[in-house]
């Protein structure tokens, strides 16, 4: 158990809909990261927040947005869903904002299926 | 543009033998590299890392080698055990960037046969 929790574990929805994925970081961690793992793909970095502020952005679609709240939990919002958005979405957390030796701990993921 | 590549989708080895997983990268700004291990229905877990100032890092049965001139790293597992069967991801980071943006390879599925 990494100490990072993600809800829900599974989500099935239809195209055009909007969903929210939730992540609670390990106690004491200030950074939260979101990654997407599509079929046959590695993990793609989406976005990082550090202590409530956006710190880094990857190839995150404009239909996707995220935020980190004062209690440090984070939400990833996916809207106007398409079939290609079906994937595993992982949240990770770490103590620092970046740099080497700043180990990221991953949650178990949310599996999103868009029908 | 895949900056971190793991060209072997899968690898099968016999228990007790050596497993060698390979990873190539293209961005010369990367200066810190990590290996993560992932079991089904779980998130990735950190395994071992190496800084670009080193060419080798060892932790028990796991050793990572870095060849900067070839932009290549490899993970050696000796001896391999059935419990090592998992997906292994190589990842890279620009350490000076002050972000935790990890760039991952596609993963290699390792099967260790008893």
Image (cartoon, rainbow, N blue to C red):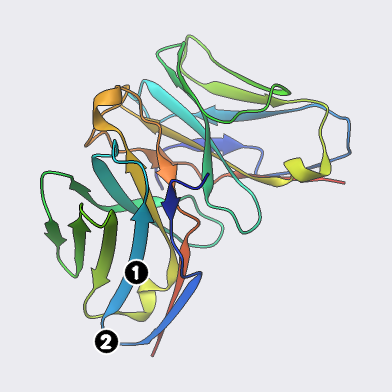
Check the image and report above or below for B39 versus A2. below
Distance between mark 2 and mark 1 Cα atoms: 13 Å
How would you rate the neighbour count of disc 2 (Cα within 10 Å): few for under 14, some for 14-19, many for 20 or more? some
Check the image and report above or below for B107 versus A25. below
Residue A1 x, y percent position in the rendering:
41, 48
Residue at the spot 46% in from the left edge and 70% down from the top edge? B8
Foreground pick, A2 / B58: B58
Would you say B13 lies left or right of A52 here? left
Labelled pair 2, 1 in contact (Cβ < 8 Å) = no
Say how many tags the image has: 2
Residue B81 x, y percent position in the rendering:
31, 80
Residue at the spot 17% in from the left edge and 44% down from the top edge? B52
Q: Quadrant of the C terminus of chain B?
A: bottom left
Foreground pick, A111 / A28: A111
Residue at the spot 19% in from the left edge and 70% down from the top edge? B61
Would you say B58 lies left or right of A95 here? left
**Chain of the residue on which disc 1 is drawn:** B
Would you say A100 lies left or right of A44 here? left
Q: Report helix, strand or loop for mark 2.
A: loop
The residue to which callout 1 is attached is: B21
Residue A32 x, y percent position in the rendering:
45, 26
Q: Say if residue B3 shows up in the picture.
A: yes
Q: Report helix, strand or loop for mark 1.
A: strand
**Chain of the residue on which disc 2 is drawn:** B
The residue to which callout 2 is attached is: B17
- Res. B96 image quadrant: top left
């Amino acid at each position: 158990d990494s100490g990072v929790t993600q809800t829900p574990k599974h989500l099935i929805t239809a195209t055009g809909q909007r969903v929210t994925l939730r992540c609670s970081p390990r106690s004491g961690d200030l950074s939260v990261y979101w990654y997407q793992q599509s079929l046959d793909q590695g993990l793609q970095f989406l976005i990082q927040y550090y202590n409530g502020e956006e710190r880094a952005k990857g190839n995150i679609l404009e239909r996707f947005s995220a935020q980190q709240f004062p209690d440090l939990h984070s939400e990833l919002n996916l809207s106007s869903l398409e079939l290609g958005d079906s994937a595993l979405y992982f949240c990770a957390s770490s103590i620092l904002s970046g740099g080497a030796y700043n180990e990221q701990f991953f949650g178990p993921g949310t599996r999103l299926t868009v029908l | 543009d895949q900056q971190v590549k793991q060209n072997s989708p899968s690898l099968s080895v016999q228990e007790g033998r050596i497993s060698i997983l390979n990873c190539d990268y293209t961005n010369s700004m990367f200066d810190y590299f990590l290996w993560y291990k992932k079991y089904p229905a779980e998130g990735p877990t950190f395994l071992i890392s190496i800084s670009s100032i080193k060419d080798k890092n060892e932790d028990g049965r796991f050793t990572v080698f870095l060849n900067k001139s070839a932009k290549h790293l490899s993970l050696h597992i000796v001896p391999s055990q059935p419990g090592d069967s998992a997906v292994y991801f190589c990842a890279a980071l620009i350490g000076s960037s002050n972000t935790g943006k990890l760039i991952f390879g596609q993963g290699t599925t390792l099967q260790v046969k008893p």
